[in-house]
Amino acid sequence: MSEGITSTGGAAAAAPPTPNRSGLDLINLTKAFPGGTLAVDDVNLHVDHGEYVVLLGPSGCGKTTTLRMIGGHEFPTSGQILLDGQSLVELPPYKRPTTTVFQHFALFPHRSVVENVEFGLKMTGVSKEERRKKALETLQMVGLETLAERKPRQLSGGQQQRVALARVLVTNPKALLLDEPLGDLDRLLQLKMRVELRNLQRQLGLMFIHVTHNQEESLSMADRIVVMNDARIQQVDDPLTIATRPRNEHVARFMGDNNIIRGTVSEAQGSRLVITDANGVKVSVQAGNDDQRAVGAAANIAVRAAAVTVGGGAAGDINSIDTEIVFVEYLGDLVKLHLVAGGERFLAKVPGDQYPTLRGKEGDTVRICWKEEDVQLLAD
């Protein structure tokens, strides 16, 4: 199984990945800009060939700088970047077996589609006949062979995106780097391109490393998600684990739709803890074997909005709380209930068919509850 390495959030830092192996290794990768701004801080990560990895986080977290260092567009202050055991650090971008697809496509407006795709081959000295053949084959791969003679301005946003992909794929890279590749597309086109991009990656079997701040995009496309914040990796896991088992409060909050309760351990019976917050809300949770918190220790937990049940239970029950409805948000197939209790915000998701009974209920009191197995004890 591929390794994700973290060095924050209260856990001990894992050893850097071993060099001289297949795939991409980032080893103690650090980037400090003039003036002392630390953009990337001691990042360790291994990515296998054929894996789709998404670097996810808010603006300024270090994800784009990490991608740019892999592609050779930024030089690391310290650390190593190895691809199949070979260092990339001293190589300029055009000599690296990686290629980058930028958010704004960067197509040549005066060149035809096929000429745009040929460009990289032309710069490396491939003959005119051979590069035309390869360019047309690659355009066929992305479904644009019939548009080969058009100019970029004659294409839709999604078609321009596919031209940008074809232009880098024609050079047969070992790793494809995607910098916010769907950011300039409208919502419906984003949804379509997610499917096309993921299917293309599976077809090619290439390593894709994709940067985004969009949680839904990362969950729908990635084999693994690397959540970053404050220049460091916070968690590396598959989408299901990231969504349902966030490791720390930052990941829980950034992924959205997690209810965070802060409190202290009021009971400890083996691995089962009861946590009580400042308003007297009691939450039970199963702690991991490596988490030995005693009574009185601080403890934060997360409960997914989708795991919250509206109604049921009794006042004062453990894993239950009375809340006031602040806003009923109808989203078609589901309803988000924005709630408040003791000055703290809560969120519940219920099926969309419940909207008729919830519409206009702002100000009403409802009891929410959840199962112990749906409670995640956070590392910080």
Image: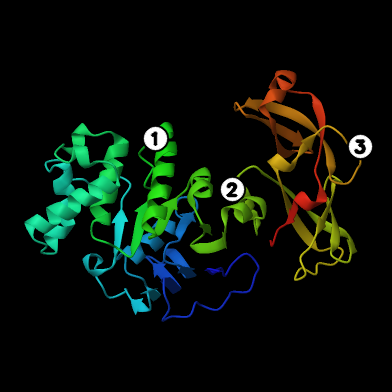
Find residue 156 and report its horizontal and vertical position in percent. 28, 33
Q: Which kind of residue does numbered mark 2 sit on? A: Met
CB contact under 8 Å: marks 1 and 3: no
The crowd level at tag 1 (other Cα within 10 Å; few <14, some 14-19, many 20+) is some
Q: Secondary structure at mark 1?
A: helix
Residue 362 visible in the displayed image: yes
Q: Nearest the camera: 257 or 220?
A: 220
Find residue 329 and report its horizontal and vertical position in percent. 64, 27
Q: Residue at x 40, y 58 (%)?
A: 208
Residue, disc 2? 255
Relative side of 82 to 13, left or right: left
Find residue 170 and report its horizontal and vertical position in percent. 23, 56
The crowd level at tag 2 (other Cα within 10 Å; few <14, some 14-19, many 20+) is many
Q: Residue at x 44, y 37 (%)?
A: 191
Q: Residue at x 32, y 38 (%)?
A: 158
The colour scheme applied to this rendered structure is rainbow
CB contact under 8 Å: marks 2 and 3: no
Residue, disc 1? 189
